[in-house]
Amino acid sequence: MEVINEVYPSSEEQIKSMGEPGPEGPIYMVNLLKFKDKAEYKDGRATDLTGRAAYMIYGRAVSGILPKFGGQAIFGADVTHLSLGQVEDLWDEVAIAMYPRRSAMIEMTSSPEWLEASVHREAGLAGQLNIETVLAQGFPNPLAE
């Protein structure tokens, strides 16, 4: 299995598939994040921020934006150890966000607020994997009241 971290979708297929309706009900987007050692802003601004620190600016902003689209930040944690399997380079962090449906994520990532915050995402990320998931049949919903 080849694994390639990316900051943006690299194929027309990926972009097209994100525009499809997707599964019924909420999706949980698993983000495997790899940070740059030093943040690099596209506009060339000088910064002493690490990639992680730049991404955290983005993460805090997105935590406030998500509820406006029916979503929420579910989980975020630093990766500390690979217990099973093999990868060339381990990710730095895992984050999970919930969206009520796939289209809500697309709406959010097209919003002016998200676009403004995303400069910090791009500056901080060396790459990532985004994996759309749904709750397994019969698995209890941790968000159910």
Image (cartoon, grey):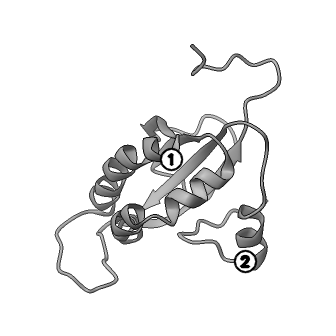
Q: Nearer the viewer, residue 35 or 106?
A: 106
Spot the residue most to the right. Answer: 137
| Label ID, residue 40 | none
In this rendering, is residue 85 above or below 104?
above
Residue 141 picture location, percent across and down: 66, 20
Q: Is residue 75 visible?
A: yes
- What is the three-letter code of the residue carrying label 1? Phe
Position of residue 16 in the picture relative to residue 79 (left or right): right
At x 76%, y 71%, the residue is: 16
Spot the residue most to the bottom. Answer: 44
At x 28%, y 55%, the residue is: 57
Q: Is residue 86 visible?
A: no
Between label 1 and label 2, give the one nearer the viewer.
1
- What is the three-letter code of the residue carrying label 2? Ser
Residue 41 picture location, percent across and down: 30, 78
- Answer with the quarter of the image where residue 67 lies: top left
Position of residue 109 in the picture relative to residue 125 (left or right): right
At x 26%, y 86%, the residue is: 44
| Label ID, residue 69 | 1
Residue 2 picture location, percent across and down: 75, 64
First along the sequence among labels 1 and 2: 2
| Label ID, residue 11 | 2
Mark pair 1, 2: CA separation: 26 Å
Q: Secondary structure at mark 1?
A: helix
Spot the residue most to the top. Answer: 145
In this rendering, is residue 132 above or below 19?
above
Q: Secondary structure at mark 2?
A: loop
- Answer with the quarter of the image where residue 77 lies: top left
